[in-house]
Image (spheres, grey):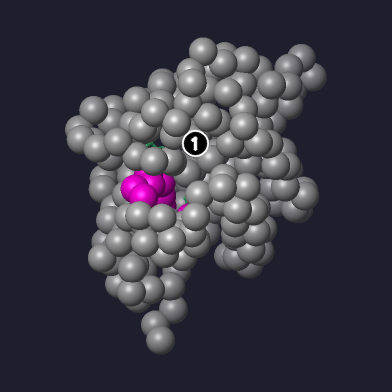
Amino acid sequence: MEEVDFGTYHHSTPEESAQARKEFKKIFSKAFEKSGIAPDSEINILDIGSGLGFLSYITANYFGNSKITGIDIFDNENLKGSSLEKARHNMEILKLSDRVKFLNVDILSSDNIDQEFDFSVSNLVLHNLGRKRFKAYENIYGLLKNGGFFLNGDIFINTSISNKFNSDIRKISNIFSVNCNIVMAKTDGLPNYRLVCLEKI
Ligand SMILES: C[S@@+](CC[C@H](N)C(=O)[O-])C[C@H]1O[C@@H](n2cnc3c(N)ncnc32)[C@H](O)[C@@H]1O
């Protein structure tokens, strides 16, 4: 079978990226279990900054009857060699093209997504948006059904004056509440990574 290529993360080697993905798979699977949603549910899931489809694949595998929409701007700075065509090709190799679709859409201007989702996932995306991440949180809120949630795996770097994770959570506390907070064991390349489950208020 042709090899799937999920790309190499910024500041990382192909080997380190592959190692990190093993950890991400574990932590997202644990969060899916904790969500209480039956793995055979027919649900619609949004993957924000889906890149070459790594998290869409993990999610589609766990929720075997789900439909996944991955959105990305295919910015090669954060994922070397990424493209919409390559992401689609990965799903063809994995025989998931009927359930996983990718769109070239910016989460900062997501008005053209005419759908609401049961929940949303994202990995290593929002920290790159600077203060615009708060606009992204708002847009994600708007794309979720009532009772929906956002599983966000990301890097929250503490500075000497602030704890980024707590300060972000405070700033979005009018739209999301923290439902579960699973902290991944530190890996060499990825200090300060957390997966947080944000529930739509
Ligand atoms: C580090 S990669 C992670 C890709 C994928 N989530 C994974 O875990 O393999 C970050 C991705 O976010 C995408 N991205 C950055 N800014 C974005 C935006 N405003 N809207 C949608 N995607 C964005 C990048 O193009 C890149 O594919």
Q: Bounds of the magenta span? A: 43-55
**Quadrant assignment for the N terminus:** bottom left
**In the rendered view, would you say 48 is above or below 42?**
above
Q: Nearer the viewer, residue 23 or 7?
A: 23
Image check: 119 left or right of 143?
Answer: right
| Residue positioned 63% across, 41% down in the render | 195
| Total numbered labels placed on residues in the image | 1
Q: Amino acid at mark 1?
A: Phe
**In the rendered view, would you say 128 is above or below 160?**
below
**In the rendered view, would you say 36 is above or below 137?**
below
| Residue positioned 68% across, 36% down in the render | 181
Image check: 15 left or right of 93?
Answer: right
| Residue positioned 24% across, 37% down in the render | 115
Query: Which residue corresponds to mark 1?
Result: 150
Q: Any magenta on residue 40?
A: no
Q: Secondary structure at mark 1?
A: strand
Q: Position of residue 60 (x, y in %)?
A: 42, 61
**In the rendered view, would you say 74 is above or below 177?**
below
Q: Position of residue 84 (x, y in %)?
A: 29, 56
Q: Any magenta on residue 54?
A: yes
Can see residue 124? Answer: no
| Residue positioned 43% across, 40% down in the render | 119
Q: Position of residue 63 (x, y in %)?
A: 45, 59
Which of the 4 image quarters holds residue 85? bottom left
Classify mark 1 as within 8 Å of ligand 1 or not, answering yes or no: no
User: Ligand 1 quadrant?
Assistant: top left
